[in-house]
Image (spheres, rainbow, N blue to C red):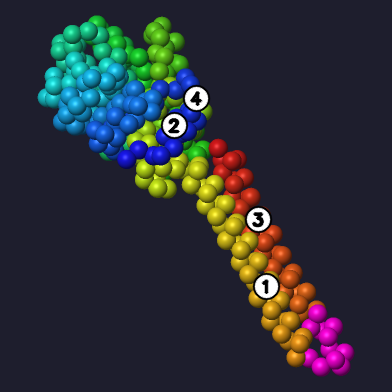
Amino acid sequence: MIRKDIKDFLNTLPSNIILVAATKYGDINDLKSLHAAGVSSFGENRVDAFLSKYEALKDLDISWHFIGHLQRNKAKEVINKIDYLHSLDSLELAKDIDKLRDTPLDCFVEVSINLEENKNGVPFYKAESFIEQCLEYPNVHIVGLMMMAVANSSANSLHEQFKKLRELKEEISHNLNIEIPYLSMGMSDDYEIAIEEGATHIRLGRILFDRGNENMSVKEKWKTTGKNTGKAFSNFGKALGKTMKVVFTDEENNIEENGRTEVSNAWREMGKSFGEAGKSFGKAMGDTAKKAVDDED
């Protein structure tokens, strides 16, 4: 099921950003609902799933993006059905595309910015020579670079990773004297930072669907945590003040009028002070957490 506020969410995205909806998170009815809400670019990362969804949704005006690793032995099954490939990562695949494709295919070169061993992609220092060789194949049309950030990266690290891909795109465009207009980077957890660093295409999945707090980006989660923590401490402070007021009021009622009332009043004021201190501490903590996230952004 797609999120209930999908139209409001879509309205938060800049108008120049192309949202590619990762279809693995939804069924056919979900995808029809997404399309009705205004999403027209769909991305799939498995050949068998793509083929079934492509057939089921063939009557809709959809731009199909293949966003997963494309095995050469399965390329012929999808290569003339997709509009974009986000994962070109070998010259062998480029040769197959050139041979199988009826018309030029818009391709993003998948770049390994962080050189992670368990990730696909052309090492960033080989990307320029790789693209130069791809220019020899007329049915391979390089339109952009794609990357995946390291999981659980800090905001500062994400900025650096996405910036590195943007600068690489600019460098290659200049050195080869070609236009590379697009950057495919940013997913549900980090798309906001990717947009800040120049993304043109963001690949979003779970954030489009009704999955509770999983819909939130990293920034949203931290801000919510700070707010809730502050609220909890504020409530604790209020409760502490009320409890101490009751205790010391009862004590005062049991004291004979022999001059000890002032002592009781002092204790009651202390309880009130504890309560106010708790409220102030809670508010300060929430504000500090929010500011820390904003500064990190």
Q: Quadrant of residue 69?
A: top left
Could you tell me which secondary element the residue under label 3 belongs to?
helix
* Residue 50, image x, y percentages: 20, 28
Kind of residue indicated by mark 4: Pro
Q: Which mark is residue 7?
A: 2
Between disc 3 and disc 1, whose residue precedes?
1
Residue 48 in sight here:
yes
Q: Quadrant of residue 39?
A: top left
Asked whether disc 2 touches disc 3, contact meaning CB atoms under 8 Å apart, the reply is no
Q: Nearer the viewer, residue 164 or 275?
A: 275
Could you tell me which secondary element the residue under label 1 belongs to?
helix
Q: CA distance from mark 1 to mark 4?
A: 48 Å
Which residues, given as a range, are shown in magenta? 255-265
Asked whether disc 2 touches disc 1, contact meaning CB atoms under 8 Å apart, the reply is no
State the residue position of label 1: 242
Q: Nearer the viewer, mark 2 or mark 3?
A: 2
Kind of residue indicated by mark 1: Lys
Q: Residue at 29% x, 31% y: name it.
A: 31
- The local crowd at label 1, few if under 14, some if 14 to 19, many if 20 or more residues have their Cα within 10 Å, is some
Q: Nearer the viewer, residue 254 or 183?
A: 254
Quadrant placement of the N terminus: top left
